[in-house]
Amino acid sequence: MDTTIKNSNLKSEEYFINMGPQHPATHGVLRLLLTIDGEIIKKVEPDLGYIHRSIEKMCERDSYQQIVHLTDRMDYLSSHINNEAVCLTVENALQIEVPERVKVIRTIIGELTRIASHCLWWGVMGMDVGALTTYFYGFRDREMINDIFEETCGARLTMNYNLPGGLMFDIHPNFVKRTKDFIAHFKTKLSEYDTLLTGNIIFQKRMKGVGILTKEDAISYGASGPVGRGSGYSCDVRKYHPYSALDKVTFNESLKTDGDSFARYQVRIQEMWESMAIIEQLIDNIPEGDYQTATNAVIKLPKGEFYQKVETARGELGVYIVSTGTKNPYRLKFRSPGFSNLSLLNHIAVGGKIGDLVATMATLDLVIPDIDR
Amino acid sequence: MVKPNNTILEIMSYFGDIFKGIKTLLTGMSVTGKYFMTSHKGAITQQYPDNRDTLKMFDRFRGEVVMPHNEINEHRCTGCQKCELACPNGSIEIIWDRQVDPETGKKKKMIDKHIYHLGMCTMCGLCIEACPTDAILWAQNYENSVYNRSALTKVLNQPGSKLMPGVED
């Protein structure tokens, strides 16, 4: 039904409103400057810098071992993958070949991190559109992964388990059993996610046809990860530039062509299935061997520029190191997935309602410390 | 003019949507209802302050850095300062001195104070990784809040403690 008043003297004006930096729906200290007309969004301008800690500058001060722990604090939901990215860059620069065991363990923990991150996203995304139950279910399953991490790495979120040249210590004896238990548990739960939320008609009406991003726009805005793949842009770094043990496993890149919020949602759900398939292929035959290769106590990278990209839970993370041959990097730049994904928010939210903006932002899965660094 | 045929279709789809909505709601509630009925088992939440006596952290949990001492007040820290160098944010300060070793009669580096700022520590574990003599370890202490910030600066070696004989870096 059309409820707008036509042919009347009532006029609406554009006005300006702040959303954030302490708004619960922005999931962090993100400030959105909204220009709206009634409920229709005319313009979204993100304002950043509320959680800037100058991590890139701090990296120039630190040694290569010390840089690793700072990357935990960027995208804290995929901290292990961030650590891995820095370690891979340093290892490539030094031309160290890490043992097979390290590669496999890194891949398994990386995929567990991805599942944990998507679990949290699923819960929070449900909450953003008004389904509070999902929040508890998502956190319930993530808790099991956090326990695995706590037992093996010693921390639940900022794990800091990697070092250039290998891992800090070997996996815990319970690791394999716990991971298998989790996979068996999560297979039953993930199908419940679909029953509970994906099939829900209210949820689908909020998601379908909202926040449409075309493939061309996804590419030109530099979208990566599930956001790009929801628009049909095949951009999985794990597929195109496999690192660690990812060249030994077979998995499908989850791809949807609709480009709306629902497509991005489906890509992430599908990705959790694929991550479980990757873990299942590796968990039974973790090769024996060392968990570390000997590196110098002071790591000095050769003079030059080095780049490595990995696929975090949010998209493509690039680490670019310029070295002058000293023990600190001359410049270190992170290409974070969240920054590019946030930049397209204006493009997909304009013309929609404020309520849809919250839902659309939830499907972008923004982590603000990753954007601000 | 709206054709009557269209109106009927509109009404039908309106009610159809309502019934579909109710059906999917019930499907979702079959999941939540299952957990509601069996909520007594399989809960992962812990009754935290009440289970303090039985709550045991994992062995590798990073609570705070400690320096273990044996019964006769000896530690394993030689004062090599590798932990101080490895620390990314200056949480460790070592005050040391060269003292005459009573056994050999030579001057030897001895720690006076091994100061650890828990408030600055990011629990990265690089100090423990760097320590050549396993003098410092992780403790599984998880209740670190205090009323005064100065209580977070700790001296890890106990007063009057000595280096364990035979420990060399």
Image (cartoon, coloured by chain):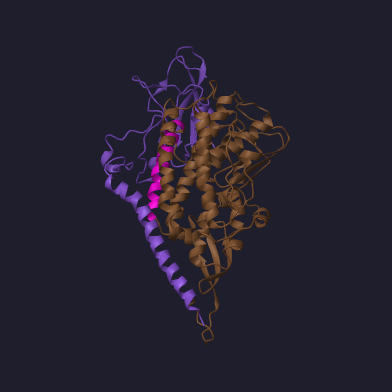
Q: Residue furthest front?
A: B5
Is B7 rendered above or below residue A314? below
Q: Position of residue A85 (x, y in %)?
A: 60, 38
Of residue B49 and residue A104, the one placed in the foreground of this image is A104
Q: Quadrant of residue A191?
A: top left
Q: Quadrant of residue B82?
A: top right
Res. A224 visible in picture: yes
Q: Position of residue B11 (x, y in %)?
A: 43, 72
Q: Is residue A141 magenta?
A: yes
User: What residue lies at 44% left-to-right and 49% top-to-bottom?
Assistant: A194
Q: Residue furthest right?
A: A304
Q: Taking A195 as reference, is A285 left or right? A: right
User: What residue lies at 33% left-to-right and 20% top-to-bottom?
Assistant: B71
Is A12 rendered above or below residue B103? below
Res. A364 visible in picture: no
Looking at the rendering, the stretch of residues picked out in magenta corresponds to A132-152
Q: Which chain is brown?
A: A
Q: Quadrant of residue A48?
A: bottom right
Q: Dominant secondary structure of the magenta stretch?
A: helix
Of residue B117 and residue B11, the one placed in the foreground of this image is B11
Q: Residue furthest top?
A: B104
Q: Taking A20 as reference, is B46 left or right? A: left
* Numbered circles on residues, count: 0
Of residue A295 and residue B150, the one placed in the foreground of this image is A295
Q: Position of residue B63 (x, y in %)?
A: 40, 35
Q: Position of residue A219 (x, y in %)?
A: 67, 53
Q: Residue furthest bottom?
A: A9
Q: Which chain is purple?
A: B
Q: Is residue B36 magenta?
A: no
